[in-house]
Amino acid sequence: MLRTLPLILLLGGCAGSGVAPLRPVDLLGLTNPARDAVEGTWSFEGPTLVTANAKFARIQIPQVPPEEYDVRLIAERTEGSNSIVLGLVGAGRPFMVAIDARFGTDEVPKSGVELIDGKSFPENETLVEGRQLINGRRSTIVVSVRRASVSVVVEGRKIIDWKSNDGRLGLHVKWKMPRRDALWLGAFACVYRVYEFTLIPVPVTS
């Protein structure tokens, strides 16, 4: 399903180049499930993006973020109890933030950043245990990517504040994407309705 792009995205060549201007970008407005889905069947219901109910479900967002930026996601889990995944780029390297991931028979949901030094978040210093999202309730997630840090805020609570070094971030092969330089969304064996996904560039000061 094709969607009409907001006027702000058509000015300055943003939609064509995929390079973020220094103003907020409506990432859902750039997304076409027929073109961009990598795993699973994604769709729009009006302006709302509905995730695929599949393992390692993911969709490419044709947008290259700047060096420093925030992303704001407003989403609601409607089926299942597993994770939503924000695919990001930091220091030129792809990585991801997962919220409410479940592993095997472990009943305790986990959230975190991966990969760090080749380790998934259950094995690195960003691990957060406990459920963050409630089914049937819209939640706001804000991830801030800076030159030397990644922070995650869920419903106004900072759950991750990681200070990074260049070269430590990476992406697990099971979440591999066609583009290493662009953003993406994912989900694992559950369904989310995504009401907003916005890129907010942050001017870099020397």
Image: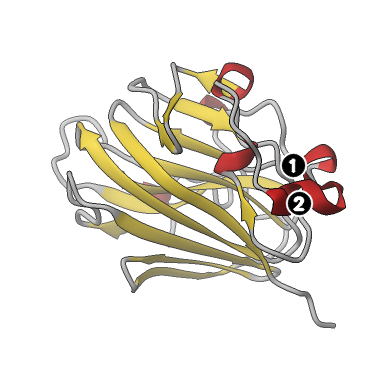
Asked if labels 2 and 1 touch by Cβ distance under 8 angstroms, the answer is yes
Q: Where in the figure is residue 68, as x and y percent of width and height?
A: 70, 66
Please state, as top left, top right, bottom left or bottom right, where the C terminus lies in the image: bottom right
Marks 1 and 2 sit apart, C-alpha to C-alpha, by: 7 Å
Instruction: Please tell me whether mark 1 sits on a helix, a strand or a loop.
Output: loop
Is 77 displayed left or right of 188 in the figure?
Answer: left
Instruction: Please tell me whether mark 2 sits on a helix, a strand or a loop.
Output: loop
Q: Is residue 162 above or below residue 101?
A: below
Which residue is most to the bottom? 206
Tell me the residue at 77%/41% (across/down).
15
Tell me the residue at 65%/54% (across/down).
25
Label 1 crowd (10 A; few <14 / some 14-19 / many >=20): some
Question: Which residue is disc 2 drawn over?
Answer: 92
Q: Amino acid at mark 2?
A: Gly
Q: Is residue 14 above or below residue 141?
A: above
Is 30 displayed left or right of 96 in the figure?
Answer: right
Label 2 crowd (10 A; few <14 / some 14-19 / many >=20): some
Question: Which residue is disc 1 drawn over?
Answer: 181
Is 122 displayed left or right of 17 in the figure?
Answer: left
Tell me the residue at 20%/51% (across/down).
137
Tell me the residue at 62%/35% (across/down).
4
Q: Where in the figure is residue 89, as x and y percent of width and height?
A: 66, 50
Identify the mark nearer the N-term, 1 or 2.
Answer: 2
Is 121 displayed left or right of 132 in the figure?
Answer: right
Q: Amino acid at mark 1?
A: Asp
Q: Where in the figure is residue 139, as x and y percent of width and height?
A: 30, 56
- Res 50 quadrant in image: top left
In this rendered view, identify the residue nearer to me: 89 or 107. 89
In this rendered view, identify the residue nearer to me: 75 or 113. 75
Please state, as top left, top right, bottom left or bottom right, where the N terminus lies in the image: top right
- Res 54 quadrant in image: top left
